Every structure is written in structure tokens, then in C-alpha cells.
Image (tube, rainbow, N blue to C red):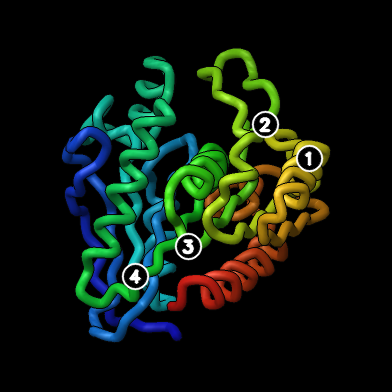
Amino acid sequence: MATDAFLSETVMITGHGGDTIEAYAALPQDPAPRGGVVVIHHMPGYDDGTKEITRNFAYHGYNAVCPNLYWREAPGAEPSDAAATSRAQGGVPDDRFLGDAEGAMRYLKGLANSNGKVGIIGYCSGGRHSWLANGSLPFDAAVVCYGAFIIGETPEGLPPRQNLAHLATTMSGPILGLFGNEDVFPTPAQVDELEGLLKDAGKPHEFHRYDNAGHAFFMVDRTSFRPEAAMDGWARIWDFFGRTIGG
């Protein structure tokens, strides 16, 4: 159910190793119990588009928080500068990300109007992070939006990333995957491979692929934006989270 009464603001949460990191929270202000969503930003960073997505979850009735994964490298920097600084230092280590994701989960579960359930969603590199978190932490649901580098080789010029195929067997919550058939990170063949891994592991999942859409088709401020794919994707996200964590 949509709500206009929510508060969005920068907060500080406890992340990996007890570090205090910046995050952006958007929280409905009524006391009715509701699920929480950890929003993971894409490789370009903790930017305006990601914050708008976080607010969209609050508008649709979820508590939402987006941790700034680049906070340690570049506190207070512009998103593109912070992303460049992080890449130059090797990117976000997987273990550190997991600590920050767990901290964001803990933040949401600690809210007075939490129903105790938390999902995670990520875009691009954040899609990889969503897969990683759901395979490593007790999330109740996960959405992978064109998750790059879950499997396959990392392109030259980007920090190398561990292949995460093995996590298909340890997924904690059901997975919704949304992909463009014109994408190359991941390719359609890699999407098929990911789906096959989940099928073999007996893990509940829903994968949807869109023609005439490539990478970043949700991003309204980019030429890659595809309204029809994005609208259908959002409808599937609301249905999926409504069934798995409750808005």
C-alpha cells in the first residue's frame, strides 16, 4: 500500500568490523509492522538514482536503507569520485560488504515497526552483492537486477571478483532475477547458467528476461532506460516482496 508519510535522511549504521558507515534510510512513519529492504547501489555509487529507488520502497510501504559501500575510501565525496577511488583501491572486498549488509539488516530489524523480515535488492555490481548476501546471510528474499560478475571473468580494468556459483546451494531466501537480453554483463548464456545452478540446487527462484533491454534498464537518467522493461520489473518486485517479506 502506497504511503506519502515517510522520512528519508542520511543515517549512520554499524557495518563490518564495528565500523560506523553512512547510509540513506527511507522509513514509513506509521507503526504498522512491515518488511525491510536493503538497497545495494550499483558500481557508479551511492547516487541520486539509488536514493530515489530507496524512497520508492518507502512509498510502497517498506522500511528501506542503502549503505554507502564506498564510505571508508571516500567519505563525503561525489558518487563518481567515490566509485573511482574505490576501484583504484581494488573495489569493495566481499567480506567487508557482507559485514555492511548484515549491519543494514540489523538496522532494519531493530526498527519499532519491523515485522522481522528483510529482503535485499541490488543493481549491476549490487546485483552480484545481492546474490552474495542471500547466499551468505539469513535474508528472507533477494532481487538480482542484471547482476554483473556473479560468474564469468571480470573485464580488464576492473577489480577481479570471485566466482560465486557455489552460493547457489546456500541461498537463504527465494530469488527474483531481472535481466536484459542485450546485456553483456551478464550475458544471456550466463543468466541461463545461473538459473540452472538454482534449479539443480532446488532453490526457489523466478527469472525474467527482457528483449530490447540491456544493462541498467531501470536507470531513468540513462540512455539505457527501457520503460516497458522497468515497469514490468517493478510490478514483479512489488509482487515478489509482497509475498516474501510483506510491505
> Percent position (x, y) of residue 236?
64, 70
Q: Secondary structure at mark 2?
A: loop
Q: Quarter of the image containing the N terminus?
A: bottom left
Q: Which residue is mark 2?
A: 151
Q: Horizontal and vertical percent for residue 241?
A: 53, 70
Badge 3: residue crowd in 10 Å (few <14, some 14–19, many ≥20): many
Q: CA distance from mark 3 to mark 1?
A: 23 Å
Answer left or right for 226 relative to 41. right
Question: What is the distance, in whole Å, between disc 2 and disc 3 at their CAs?
Answer: 23 Å
Horizontal and vertical percent position of residue 43: 48, 35
Local SS, label 3: loop
Mark 2 / mark 4, whichever is N-terminal: 4
Q: Residues within 10 Å of mark 2 (few under 14, many from 20)?
A: many
Q: What amino acid type should be assigned to the residue bearing mark 3?
A: Asp
Distance between mark 2 and mark 1 Cα atoms:
9 Å
| Lower sequence index among marks 1 and 4 | 4
- Residue 18: image location, x then y, percent: 18, 37
Element assignment for label 4: strand
Q: Amino acid at mark 4?
A: Gly
Report the residue marked by disc 3.
140
Look at the numbered disc 1 and give the secondary structure of its residue: helix
Q: Which mark is residue 116?
A: 4
Q: Is residue 63 above or below residue 54?
A: below
Residue at the disc numbered 1: 193
- Amino acid marked by disc 2: Ile
Task: Using the numbered discs, state the Cα–Cα distance from disc 3 to disc 4 in whole angstroms.
Answer: 9 Å
Tell me the mark number nearer the camera, choosing from 2 and 4.
4
